[in-house]
Image: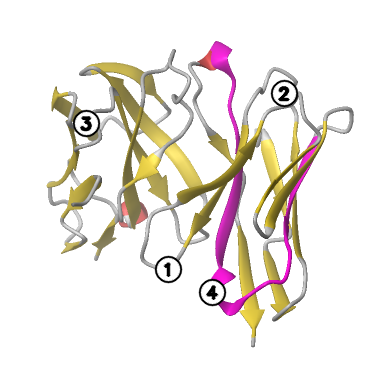
Amino acid sequence: QQQVKQSPQSLIVQKGGISIINCAYENTAFDYFPWYQQFPGKGPALLIAIRPDVSEKKEGRFTISFNKSAKQFSLHIMDSQPGDSATYFCAASMKAAGNKLTFGGGTRVLVKP
Amino acid sequence: DTAVSQTPKYLVTQMGNDKSIKCEQNLGHDTMYWYKQDSKKFLKIMFSYNNKELIINETVPNRFSPKSPDKAHLNLHINSLELGDSAVYFCASSHGPLSSGANVLTFGAGSRLTVL
């Protein structure tokens, strides 16, 4: 049972464009929703995270939008740059499960110059 | 100074062999993890240790045996390697499960295991 579903699997965007990645979750007990960024040959690294008491969080060109009623959250990369080309993972965790992270399937983003 | 370091980075071996991957973190974290990333990039947790105690043991064949000699080290030993074990194995660490930083993981660079 995949508790966090991520789409699309891959995405190609022109430099300067907006990349949008969507995630949907099933368990309403999840209370923390991070996004991780992974470059080829490297481990994933925390990019930005949100808790369900806010609907949006922005850090630089990266924004998380959170819709609690729809059980969905998304990552927007504004003014996408070639250096943003990476695999992005959404994830979710809950205190009741010891804060264990459950990852989505990942989205490969390619930003063309 | 690498925060989470794992060795070896690459490992190529024959089916049926036994191999180990080592991991060390210098972040002072209490919890360490092993994740498996398959060819489709899917990340799946295998094990988690908190202060040397096993706290997460997902459905993993018992050919996989983690060992944590202290809270800064978590090793993964794999017996009787099979073709399907080929993957990238990531070590990660975080603060303890009840801490505010428990869900912020720091990953190592990965160990790519190829079973021939």
Circle 3 sits in a helix, a strand or a loop, which is it? strand
Percent x, y of residue A15: 69, 81
| Residue of label 1 | A40
| Residue of label 2 | A27
Q: In which quarter of the view is residue A53 placed?
A: top right
Badge 1: how crowded within 10 Å, few (<14), some, or many (20+)? Answer: few
Cα separation, mark 1 vs mark 2, equals: 31 Å
Q: Is residue A74 left or right of residue B72?
A: right
Q: Is residue B57 visible?
A: yes
Q: Nearer the viewer, residue A80 or A112?
A: A80
| Residue of label 3 | B65
Q: Are marks 3 and 2 on the same chain?
A: no
Identify the residue shown where x is 38% and y is 34%.
B46
Q: Are marks 1 and 3 on the same chain?
A: no
Q: Chain of mark 1?
A: A
Q: Is residue B54 left or right of residue A43?
A: left
Q: Earlier in the sequence, mark 1 or mark 2?
A: 2
| Residue of label 4 | A83
Badge 4: how crowded within 10 Å, few (<14), some, or many (20+)? Answer: few
Circle 4 sits in a helix, a strand or a loop, which is it? helix
Up-down relation of residue A105 to residue B40 (above or below): above
Q: Specify the segment rendered in magenta.
A: A72-96
Q: Earlier in the sequence, mark 2 or mark 4?
A: 2
Frontmost of labels 3 and 4 is 4
Cα separation, mark 2 vs mark 4, equals: 34 Å
Cα separation, mark 1 vs mark 4, equals: 12 Å
Identify the residue shown where x is 67% and y is 38%.
A4
